[in-house]
Amino acid sequence: QVQLVESGGGLVQAGGSLRLSCAASGRTFTGATLGWFRQAPGKEREFVASITWLGGTKYYADSVKDRFTISRDTAKNTVYLQMNSLKPEDTAIYYCNTVSRVSSPGNYWGQGTQVTVSS
């Protein structure tokens, strides 16, 4: 069974930082672009960031550019999202998934990890 399991969320004050992790199991994602998405209460799920297999190309949503950094460890089959200067509007459930066409998600939705930023 293929799974992407997110972790690292929590409650943090505005201006703080969190590091999310997404571990793949059941298969490797050799060659795949992976990324992060988020869904805030009452809103549509949106693209946050993506990274190609060897990490040479990264894309970010304008809302997180210069604050979030995506990275991956291919040996560990894990992708990370370092989130700095967090804002209350970053509050959402964060999911990782495969990505095509820069920001389109695949079909590997997991449970996500909750990030709550207090003002």
Image (cartoon, rainbow, N blue to C red):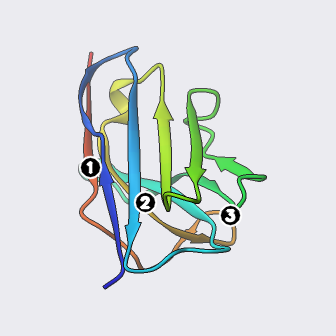
Instruction: Identify the residue at the far front of this view.
Output: 75
Residue 39 is left or right of residue 101, and the answer is left
Q: For numbered disc 2, what is the local secondary structure?
A: strand
Residue 87 is left or right of residue 77, and the answer is left
- Residue 107 placement: quadrant: bottom left
Residue 66 is left or right of residue 48, and the answer is right
Q: Is residue 6 above or below residue 105?
A: above
Residue placed at 27% from the left, 39% from the top?
Answer: 9
Instruction: Identify the residue at the far bottom of this view.
Output: 1
Residue placed at 24% from the left, 49% from the top?
Answer: 41
For marks 3 and 1 on the same chain, the one whose residue lies earlier in the sequence: 3
Disc 3, disc 1: CB below 8 Å?
Answer: no
The mark found on residue 113 in the picture is 1
| Residue 45 image position (x, y, % from top left) | 39, 59
Decide which of 35, 53 is in the foreground and name it: 53
Residue placed at 68% from the left, 50% from the top?
Answer: 59
Residue placed at 61% from the left, 55% from the top?
Answer: 50
| Residue 117 image position (x, y, % from top left) | 28, 26
Q: Which residue is mark 3?
A: 53
Quarter of the picture containing the N terminus is bottom left
Disc 2, disc 1: CB below 8 Å?
Answer: no
For marks 3 and 2 on the same chain, the one whose residue lies earlier in the sequence: 3
Q: Nearer the viewer, mark 3 or mark 2?
A: 3
The mark found on residue 96 in the picture is 2
